[in-house]
Amino acid sequence: PMEPADPLRPLLEHTRGLGEKDLSLALALGEVVSVDLPLAQLALQRLAAGLGVPHPDTEPAKET
């Protein structure tokens, strides 16, 4: 994961938020029209970690 002090982190967190919103909307639309979107589901699951900015509740605990 990206370090909290990395200057690119806010940019990638914003990108993560937009990507998750868009993928969630696509999945909701797919559900409405009865279309399974397995790659969109996978992308949503892996987006945050792939960008290096996982959600705090999914980050592994750091050793002290």
Image (tube, grey):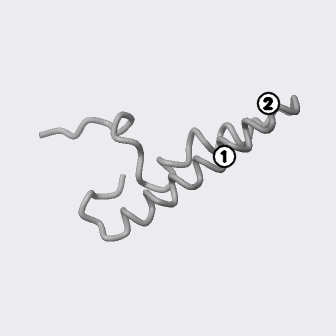
Q: Amino acid at mark 1?
A: Leu
Query: Can you say whether 48 is above or below 63 in the image?
Result: below
Q: Which residue is mark 1?
A: 23
Viewport quadrant of the C terminus:
top left
Give the label on residue 31, or none: 2
Cα distance in 3D space between marks 2 and 1: 12 Å
Query: Which of the 4 image quadrants contains residue 30?
Result: top right
At x 39%, y 35%, the residue is 58
What residue is shown at x 65% (from left), y 39% (from top)? 42
**Residue 45 relative to residue 22: left or right:** left
| Quarter of the figure with residue 32 | top right
Residue 58 shown left or right of residue 38 in the figure: left
Residue 5: where, in percent of width, then height? 24, 63
**Percent from the top left, x then y, of residue 47?**
55, 48
User: x and y percent of residue 56 in the render?
Assistant: 34, 40
Whether residue 24 is situated above or below residue 10 in the rendered picture: above
Q: Which mark is residue 47?
A: none
Three-letter amino acid code at disc 2?
A: Glu
Above or below, 4 against 35 in this view is below
Element under disc 2: helix
Q: Which of the two discs, 2 and 1, labels the residue nearer the N terminus?
A: 1
Between 52 and 34, which is closer to the camera in this rendering?
34
Above or below, 38 relative to 48: above
Which class describes the residues within 10 Å of circle 2: few (<14), some (14-19), or many (20+)?
A: few
Q: Residue at x 45, y 62 (%)?
A: 12
Q: Residue furthest bottom?
A: 7
Helix, strand or loop under label 1: helix
Determine crowd level at label 1: few under 14, some 14-19, many 20+ residues with C-alpha closer than 10 A: many
